[in-house]
Image (cartoon, grey):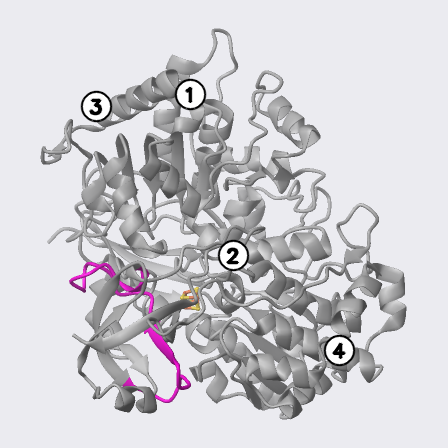
């Protein structure tokens, strides 16, 4: 028998923004690494990783099962010349040359903005960096957006407007020190399970710790709360305004902190005069006494921490919801000290890293602004581009990007590591967009996603356990991701694919004598370039490189040169990242959801995650054991609403909105109130006859964050 060599590799779980450290066990059957002989056989939580101290949730523990077989993986590049043809296998050289030629030709014919990139919070920071540089620095378009637009952009807008910079002021240690925890639009028990266990442990140590959960649904998190505020969907701003009104009235605000460290409180106070607890509670559909209790617990707490996620972000007023919550912290001085602060929980594993490199349509590298001529000039100098080479026009954000493909304004799209035909709202429009597009490139690890059928070119990507780089988790902590086994077949790391095609485009588009932009020989070189671009910025990681991360383990930013360690908690000195160092209050009037219910569509549809599934299930759907918790797709409806419609549990029902419909089995449940229904976001065309819940969801976006209102739509439900 051939010798079997066993290895153990320190890396990171590829699912949520908790960013748990893992130890990957692999076997290499032929005595050395090689695609045929290597496989991942086990996993353990990394006891030395500060995010999880050895803990893993069900999804993380099952990662080896998702990597066990190459069935369903894309193993070699495929292409077709005409839409009517079937794609056929080609070698990498042909695929890379063809993509470069087609993109360069489209830019020649229609200009740089005829090309767009749609990338992913699942990418590593180095992957993201290459694609951002390719779009903005080489092609000259800001049309690069990410599925992080669907996830975190309202949190980003809220932090920037209130605190002056993106990124949470808090750290995971604050979970141990908080005495009042306000969960807002976050089912943390299911979506960030390892951090939730840490909170549970803190409450076991100190039974005086109080949990307030704001959620229209009685989620697993809400079921464990000391106070559950089951507000009407979309009314969070009224709730937070009402709480702050009470705090002002009762003298529970920190006037000294407001005077010394903030601006704009007088204007906000004027608005809040109207938000009496009774008025706010009426809007929210809760008892005024409960709103007052929440305000009292928050205002009188020695350390109040808020934890929030998609329930605030995925809304046409997501930015206001974030701001109104941050106001509670600023007005009470509950920020910059242990156990306190507004802590936005990152959905995806590397939504933070993507923002750090500027990999979105509305930002530049290292938290620089597209609209700022000085910022553009800095990046131009760093990349050795001619002056004014970077476009000053914001690129197209996710929903608008696909609308522009549909209208023909954008001709070609390169989709990397994401499945927009499942995850974007109103997916009928996304399908039309991809049918209309002149050229669709899909870079993927898996063969069965809903987006793959639209690809003119399929580029096989390496996946978890198969590539090197870094990610940044919810507490700004950068961890090394390491390769345990080689990728299967001809799959390649995402950065490599981007770099190779960029080099070929550069040869066609760049003026003679221009400095080469894409000479990267590996992820360490990319990280180093990114590092140098952050120097002097709020996220300065000038003191970090792979060797430091390998020697000292994961580190939080900022980590400037000479610091020796990252900063756990920001704004402890009360100096914020605004021009004058003061945080800002912004008046946030309550405004209703984008699509009110009507006689024709009388029910409010909420969407969310399940504990053991991830996104479109291209990975978790490969593991039978992960279906034990929630075996089937379903629509959850209050028994009174079902009785009114003559519906019974397990009936097949048609869920319809103005945009589309899908059929789901019905589950009677009092976790939702009457008038509201719930469906999980995960089930896609792989599992359903239709394309999942986004057949009916709402594409309207927040005017500042440009994030769509995936959390609410008006629907009708009838027997199928
Ligand atoms: Fe992975 Fe998140 Fe579970 Fe940690 S909590 S193991 S990062 S899915």
Q: Badge 2 local density, few (<14 within 10 Å), some, or many (20+)?
A: many
Labelled disc at residue 94:
3
**Where's the C terminus, which quadrant?**
bottom left
Q: Position of residue 569 (x, y in %)?
A: 70, 62
Residue 672 lies in magenta, yes or no? yes
Labelled disc at residue 152:
2
What's the residue at 45%, 69% (across, down)?
596
The range drawn in magenta is: 668-694
Q: Badge 3 local density, few (<14 within 10 Å), some, or many (20+)?
A: few
Q: Relative to 124, say whether 394 is above or below.
A: above
Q: Position of residue 196 (x, y in %)?
A: 50, 77
Label 3 or label 2, whichever lies nearer to me, is 2
Which quarter holds ligand 1?
bottom left
Side of 231 relative to 542 (left or right): left
Q: Earlier in the sequence, mark 3 or mark 2?
A: 3
Distance from disc 3 to disc 1, alpha carbons, whole Å, reads 24 Å
Distance from disc 1 to disc 2, alpha carbons, whole Å, reads 30 Å
Secondary structure type for disc 3 = helix
Q: Earlier in the sequence, mark 4 or mark 1?
A: 1
Q: Position of residue 189 (x, y in %)?
A: 45, 78
What's the residue at 75%, 50% (across, down)?
577
Q: Relative to 78, say whether 621 is above or below.
A: below
Secondary structure type for disc 4 = helix
Labelled disc at residue 111:
1
Distance from disc 3 to disc 2, alpha carbons, whole Å, reads 37 Å
Disc 3, disc 4: CB below 8 Å?
no
What's the residue at 46%, 52% (across, down)?
148
Residue annotated with mark 4: 245
Q: Position of residue 480 (x, y in %)?
A: 48, 50
Residue 16 lies in magenta, yes or no? no
């Amino acid at each position: 028998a051939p010798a079997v060599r066993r290895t153990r590799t320190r890396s990171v779980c590829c699912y949520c923004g908790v960013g748990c450290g893992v130890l990957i066990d692999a076997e290499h059957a032929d005595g050395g690494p090689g695609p045929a002989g290597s496989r991942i056989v086990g996993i353990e939580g990394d006891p030395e990783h500060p995010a999880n101290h050895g803990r893993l949730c069900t999804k993380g523990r099952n990662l080896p099962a998702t990597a066990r077989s190459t069935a369903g993986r894309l193993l070699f590049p495929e292409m077709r010349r005409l839409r009517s043809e079937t794609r056929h296998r080609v070698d990498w050289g042909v695929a890379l040359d063809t993509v470069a030629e087609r993109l360069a030709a489209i830019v020649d014919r229609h200009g740089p903005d005829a090309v767009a990139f749609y990338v992913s919070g699942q990418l590593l920071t180095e992957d993201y960096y290459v694609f951002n540089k390719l779009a903005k620095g080489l092609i000259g378009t800001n049309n690069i957006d990410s599925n992080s637009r669907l996830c975190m952009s309202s949190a980003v807008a809220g932090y920037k407007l209130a605190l002056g910079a993106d990124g949470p002021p808090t750290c995971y240690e604050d979970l141990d020190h908080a005495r009042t925890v306000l969960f807002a639009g976050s089912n943390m028990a299911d979506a960030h399970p390892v951090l939730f266990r840490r909170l549970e442990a803190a409450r076991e140590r100190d039974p005086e710790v109080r949990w307030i959960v704001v959620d229209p649904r009685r989620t697993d998190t809400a079921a464990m709360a000391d106070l559950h505020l089951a507000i009407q969907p979309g009314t969070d701003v009224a709730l937070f305004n009402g709480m702050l009104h009470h705090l002002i009235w009762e003298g529970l605000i920190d006037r000294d902190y407001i005077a010394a460290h903030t601006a704009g409180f007088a204007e906000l106070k004027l608005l809040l005069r109207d938000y009496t607890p009774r008025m706010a509670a009426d809007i929210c559909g809760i008892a005024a006494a409960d709103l007052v209790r929440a305000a009292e617990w928050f205002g009188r707490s020695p350390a109040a921490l808020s934890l929030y996620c998609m329930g605030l972000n995925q809304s046409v007023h997501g930015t206001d919801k974030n701001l109104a919550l941050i106001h509670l912290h600023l007005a009470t001085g509950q920020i910059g000290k242990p156990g306190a602060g507004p802590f936005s929980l990152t959905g995806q594993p590397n939504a933070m890293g993507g923002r750090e490199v500027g990999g979105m349509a509305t930002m530049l590298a290292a938290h620089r602004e597209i609209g700022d001529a000085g910022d553009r000039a800095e990046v131009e100098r760093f990349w050795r581009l001619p002056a004014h080479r970077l476009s000053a026009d914001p690129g197209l954000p996710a929903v608008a990007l696909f609308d522009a493909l549909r209208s023909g304004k954008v001709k070609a799209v390169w989709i990397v590591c994401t499945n927009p035909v499942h995850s974007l709202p109103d997916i009928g429009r996304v399908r039309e967009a991809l049918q209309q597009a002149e050229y669709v490139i899909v870079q993927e690890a898996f063969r069965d996603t809903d987006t793959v059928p639209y690809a003119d070119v399929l580029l096989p990507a390496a996946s978890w356990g198969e590539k090197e780089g870094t990610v940044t988790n919810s507490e700004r902590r950068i961890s090394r991701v390491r390769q345990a086994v080689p990728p299967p077949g001809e799959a390649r790391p995402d950065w490599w694919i981007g770099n190779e095609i960029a080099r070929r485009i550069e040869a066609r588009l760049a003026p003679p004598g221009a400095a080469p932009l894409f000479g990267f020989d590996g992820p360490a070189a990319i990280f180093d370039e990114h590092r140098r671009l952050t120097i002097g910025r709020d996220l300065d990681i000038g003191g970090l490189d792979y060797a430091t991360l390998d020697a000292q383990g994961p580190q939080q930013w900022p980590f400037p040169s000479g610091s020796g360690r990252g900063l756990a908690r920001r704004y402890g000195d009360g100096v914020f990242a605004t021009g004058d160092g003061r945080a800002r209050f912004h008046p946030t009037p309550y405004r209703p959801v984008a699509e009110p219910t009507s006689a024709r569509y009388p029910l409010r549809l909420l969407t969310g995650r399940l504990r053991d599934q991830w996104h479109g299930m291209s990975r978790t759907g490969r593991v039978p054991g992960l279906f034990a918790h929630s075996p089937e797709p379903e629509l959850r409806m209050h028994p009174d609403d079902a009785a009114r419609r003559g519906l019974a549990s397990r009936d097949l029902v048609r869920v319809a909105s103005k945009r589309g419909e899908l059929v789901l089995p019905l589950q009677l449940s009092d976790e939702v109130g009457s008038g509201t229904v719930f469906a999980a976001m995960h089930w896609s065309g792989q599992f359903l006859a239709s394309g999942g819940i986004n057949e009916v969801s709402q594409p309207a976006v927040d005017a500042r964050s440009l994030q769509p209102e995936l959390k609410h739509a008006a629907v009708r439900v009838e027997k199928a």
